[in-house]
Image (cartoon, rainbow, N blue to C red):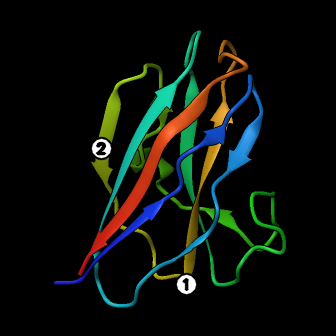
Amino acid sequence: MAKMLIDLSGIVVSGTDVAYSKSFPLPSGNPAFACCVKAASPGAVKVKLELEVSNEIPTTEYAIDSNWSLVERAEEFLDLIEDTDKHAFAYEPPATQFARIKATGITGNDAATALEKLQVSYIK
């Protein structure tokens, strides 16, 4: 059984800004996929997380890219974080070559909110 852990921690989601993680390759086959996330903030946390996928690496990492799209049925992904607890969840990404996490600050989110922990793992 092969394991792969990708650490994407440290993304800052200021106020209502949008932030993207670094893209990461998705393995072929049918891996089990899990994500662990924990926000840190001196104030309120309101961050929406979505999974984006593509068959091309982004033109510029950490930036919007027209070759990337949100996964249908995005409500299956952890949608909204409103605390500083650690959250873990499983998800089955579609058959694409790359993925990344899109984090959007929702009204009321503190300007200093960061994703203190954001890790993606695969078990195959």
Which of the two residues, 43 or 79, is positioned nearer the viewer here?
Answer: 43
Residue 40: percent from left, percent from top: 51, 25
Which residue is at the far left?
1
Examine the rendered structure and indicate whether residue 71 appears above or below residue 47: below
Which of the two residues, 33 or 112, is positioned nearer the viewer here?
Answer: 112
Q: Amino acid at mark 1?
A: Gln
Residue 32: percent from left, percent from top: 26, 71
Residue 66: percent from left, percent from top: 82, 68
Numbered label tally: 2
Q: Quadrant of residue 58?
A: bottom right
Residue at label 1? Answer: 97
Q: Amino acid at mark 2?
A: Ala
Could you give the CA–CA distance between mark 2 and mark 1, rounded to whole angstroms? 23 Å
Which of the two residues, 4 or 94, is positioned nearer the viewer here?
Answer: 4
Quadrant in which the N terminus appears: bottom left
Relative side of 70 to 4, left or right: right
Say the numbered circle drawn on residue 88: 2
Q: Quadrant of residue 86?
A: top left
Residue 83: percent from left, percent from top: 43, 19
**Considering the numbered disc 1 on the image, is that residue within a helix, a strand or a loop?**
loop
Examine the rendered structure and indicate whether residue 22 appears above or below residue 1: above
Q: Residue at x 46, y 82 (%)?
A: 95
Q: Residue at x 47, y 48 (%)?
A: 118
Relative side of 28 to 9, left or right: left
Mark 1 surroundings within 10 Å by alpha-carbon count, few (fewer than 14), some (14 through 19), many (20 or more): some
Q: Between disc 2 and disc 1, whose residue precedes?
A: 2
Q: Residue at x 74, y 40 (%)?
A: 18
Examine the rendered structure and indicate whether residue 15 appears above or below residue 77: above
Q: Residue at x 68, y 21 (%)?
A: 112
Say the numbered circle drawn on residue 23: none
